[in-house]
Every structure is written in C-alpha cells, then in structure tokens.
Image: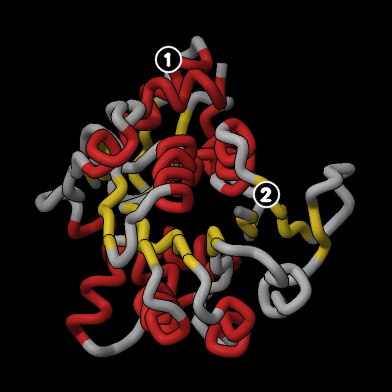
Amino acid sequence: MTVLVTGATGHTGRHVVAGLKAVGVHTRALVRGETGDPDAVRGDIRDLAEAAEGVDAVYLLWPFFTADGIEEALEPLAGKKIVYLSAMSAEAEAEAGDGGVWGDVEAAVRKVTGDWTFLRVTGLATNALAWAPQAKTGVVRAAYGQAKRSVVHERDVADMAVKALTEDHKGQIYLVTGPEALAHAEQARLIGDALGTPVAWEEQPPEEAIEQLATYLGAEFAKAAVDHWASLVDDPEPVSLDVARVTGHPARPFDEWAREHFS
C-alpha cells in the first residue's frame, strides 16, 4: 500500500506522514520545495497526475478559501481511497445548498470515489499560534473572548487520518474535536501558563477584527469567521467522542497543546 499525503509539511500532514511510517505504510509526501526526504515528491495540489500515479490512498488537504479548480485537481484520484480534512461547517453548507469550500470539496470527492472518509474538525488548536507575538507581550487582543471552541490537537487529526487510511472507514463522516469547549480568553490564559507569564485578554471590536483578518483571509471569509465566534458565546462548539472511538485514546487537551508549542 502506498499513501499520498498532501500538505505533507503542514501542521497535520507531517504527523500523518510520521504516523503512517510508524505502522509500516509506504508514504509519498507531496511538497512544494526540497526536504531531503527520499519519499517526497515535489508538486502542486492542483496538478496531482504524477504524484498520484500508483498510490492506493490519499490524505487530502485543500488549502484554499474557495473550491475553484477542485474537480480538475481530483481527476487523478478517481477510484482511490480519499481521507479529506474537512470542517464542521460542511454539513451546514450542504443543508443550505449554498456550497462553501468544505462542502464543495466534499461533493467533488464523492464524485470521484466511493471510498471516502471526511474528518470534519471544529477548528485546529494551531490557529492559536497567530496569538503568539501578542501573548509574549502579556496581552492578546482579539474578538469574542467568551466564544467557546472545541479546538483539536493536530496530532489527534493525524491519528484519525492514519486510522482512516489504513482501516475500513469507507463512507464515514467524523466530527473531530478537542475534549472540551474552551473560551478564547481561557485558551490565552493557558498559553500564558505554558509561557510561564500571565496572558490577559483584551476584547477587540468585531469590525476591527474583521478588517484585520481580511488582509489574509479575504473580507467574506473574515466576516464569516467573526460571526461564527459571536454565535459561540451562547452556543459553544460541540464536543465529540469520535477521536476516542476511532483512535482508542482520548482527545488531547488544549493545555497539553499549549505546553508543546509555547514552553
């Protein structure tokens, strides 16, 4: 068996590669630059013809904010097992019938293969790395400090992916979350604990947050993100037991993630 891992040097992909190698699965890592890894292949997610040749399964990460070009990108993966890193919002997108990047990619995957597994995450704990420069000053300024998120450790996502790639999880949709829903401000406090210095939360006006995020997310995506945070103040993200059910171990808590990344 050979597995192609896209986004192989990213937050989840590098752990997927390590996990597959640990269980003896031959891995082909798609990278954009030189890594020195003899099993790596240089390429682009939009052109998988060469990278996908001869592989049996694919860990798919689509790194764009729109699904433009997804159908053409997936053509070389026809009939192969695909484990796609999706998002919880894909379900809402599908019910609303208005697409959205995750829902559109899921739909495209279903068209090219019947052997698919979707890992729908609420959010990755690694997104909190964006607060690192502020945290080191002792204050994190962002919107909706009481928005409660069940963000997941990237290694738990990778553990789920390895199971889905090496076992029969055909047609399964998993909700991949951390073990509890923590407020943004509490996440910042735990980062402070890991740093060994207090980190306070400073509430940022939503309009200012949208403007700031729009510089790299785009205006539409930034507004959707901030609106989502607003909804989580009174309606926290759900907590799923799928990580424990599939991997056999409980989801790693945020404080463990913070110690690994900020200590």
Residue 195 placement (x, y as % from top left):
52, 16
Q: Residue at x 76, y 57 (%)?
A: 31
- Report the label total: 2
Q: Residue at x 35, y 31 (%)?
A: 187
Residue assigned mark 1: 193
| Side of 76 relative to 202 (left or right) | right
| Side of 196 relative to 151 (left or right) | right
* Residue density around tag 2, few if under 14, some if 14–19, many if 20 or more, within 10 Å: many
Q: Quadrant of residue 115?
A: bottom left
Residue assigned mark 2: 27
| Side of 224 relative to 217 (left or right) | left
Residue flagged by tag 1: what amino acid is it?
Answer: Asp
Residue flagged by tag 2: what amino acid is it?
Answer: Thr
Residue 196 placement (x, y as % from top left):
50, 10
* Residue density around tag 1, few if under 14, some if 14–19, many if 20 or more, within 10 Å: some
Q: Residue at x 60, y 31 (%)?
A: 22
Residue 181 placement (x, y as % from top left):
22, 38
Local secondary structure at mark 1: helix
Q: Quadrant of residue 177?
A: top left
Query: Relative to 123, does residue 221 appear above or below in the rendering?
Result: below
Query: Relative to 78, does residue 1 appear above or below in the rendering?
Result: above
Which one is in front, 11 or 183? 11
Which one is in front, 178 or 44? 44
Q: Is residue 57 something one can see in this rendering?
A: yes
Q: How is the image coloured?
A: secondary structure
Decide which of tag 2 and tag 1 comes sooner along the chain.
2
Query: Relative to 144, does residue 46 appear above or below in the rendering?
Result: below
Local secondary structure at mark 2: strand
